Image (cartoon, rainbow, N blue to C red):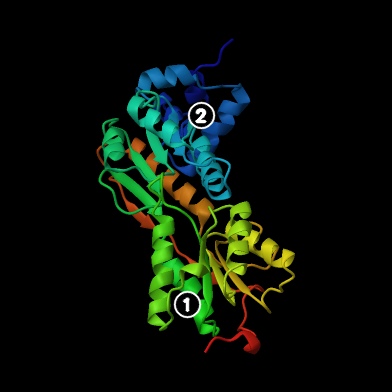
Amino acid sequence: MTVSITDVARAAGVSASTVSRALRGRPGVSDPVRAQIEAVAAELGYTASQSASSLASGRTRTIGVVVPYVGRWFFGTVLDASERVFSAAGYDVLLYNLGSPETRKRFFARLPVRKRVDALLSLLIPDEEEAAALRSLDIPLAVIVGGARDGFSVVGIDDRAGATLAVRHLVNLGHRRIGMLSGASEPLHWTTPIERRQAYLDVLADAGLPYDPALEADGGYSVEGGERAMAVLLAGRGRPTAVFAQSDEMAMGALRALRRHRLKVPDDVSVIGFDDHELAEVIGLTTIAQPVAGQGEEAARLLLRQIDEPGGAQPRQVRMPIRLVLRETTAPPDPRHRVP
C-alpha cells in the first residue's frame, strides 16, 4: 500500500501540515521534531509527491541560476555551493549559461524562466533594462558581485578594498615597478576588473609611482590568458619586479610564463593573486582570500528565506570578508632590480 502524509503524521504524533513543513525544510518545526518526522518517514518508506506539493503550494520547487562562465572556477564554485543549499531544502536548480552576448540577449528577450522557477540567482550583473525584466518576474532575486540594485539581494565583496590590499602589500615590500594582469568588463557588464584596476591606479598614485601602460596587460581571467599577459609584460621595455594578477588563475598563468623565461619567484619577480583558489595554497601563492563558496551559500539562504516569508523578508545586501594571505610568491625586490 502507498504510504500517505497522514500515515506519517499519525505515526509521528503530529499534524500533516507539520510533516509537510518538516520534510520540505520549512521553518516552524524544531530540530528534534524534524528529526523524528524524517525518521518515521524513512521507516514507513514515505516519499513526498513533488507534483502534488507544487500544486498545493503554487510553487515549482525550482530555482533558476544564470551564469556567464559555468566552466570557470569562481562561477563553478559559487554554483556548486548554492546548489547544495537549494538541494538540502528540496529545490531543483535550472541552469542557464549565458556565455555569449547573443545567448544573453536571447535570454533576456524571452525570459524562459517565467513561471518555471520560484526564485532566481544571477552570477552576472544585469544592466538596468535586464534588471527591470527580471523584476517583472515577481519572484525573489539575488545577484553575486556588483553593487546595490533595487529588488535584488546582493552578496559580494569589496573588490576595490581587496585589490588595494594586494597592491599596497607590494608597495610596502619596496616594489616600485608593479605590473598588473587585468581583464575586460565588456560584454558582460562586469564591474570586478574596473574596481580592481582603479584600486591599482589609486595605490600607485598614493605611493607617488607613475602609471606605465606597458606594465598592464589583459589576462582574460584565465590561466592561459595570464600566461600570455605575463609574456607581454616581460617583452616590454623594462620588466616589473612585482605583478598583481586580478585573479589567482591569471597568477598561475603568470607563474608558468616566468618559469618558462627562467625567472625565479619571488627572487626576480613577486606575484600576488586574488581569490584564494583551491590550488593557491598548493603552489604557495600569496593572494587576497574571499569566501567564494560562502557567497553562493549566503545568496541561496537569502533566496530561500524570501520564498518562505513572502512579503516579509526583504532583499538584503551582504558584504563578505576578505583578507591578505601571505605565502611564498612575494618578497622585497632584489636590490639589483630596485627602481629609484
Marks 1 and 2, how far apart at CA: 60 Å
Crowd tier of the residue under label 1, counting other residues whose Cα lies within 10 Å: few below 14, some 14–19, many 20 or above: many
Residue 115: name its quadrant.
top left
On the rendered structure, is 21 left or right of 79? left
66 up-or-down from 340: above or below: above
Residue 108 image point, x, y percent: 35, 31
Q: In the rendered image, which quarter contains the N terminus?
A: top right
Pair 1/2: label in front? 1
Residue 332 image point, x, y percent: 60, 84
Residue at (42% x, 36% y) in the render: 101
Residue at (40% x, 71% y) in the render: 201
| Mark 2, residue position | 12
**Can I make out residue 143 in this image?**
yes
Q: If you read the primary sequence from the N terminus, does the residue marked by circle 1 or circle 2 appear first?
A: 2
Q: What residue type is labelled 2?
A: Ala
Residue 256: name its quadrant.
bottom right
Q: Which amino acid does label 1 sit on?
A: Arg
| Mark 1, residue position | 168
300 up-or-down from 325: above or below: above
Residue 308 image point, x, y percent: 35, 36
Secondary structure of residue under mark 1: helix
Q: Which of 177 and 66 is in front in this view?
A: 177
Q: Nearer the viewer, residue 11 or 156?
A: 156
Secondary structure of residue under mark 2: helix
Q: Nearer the viewer, residue 90 or 326?
A: 326
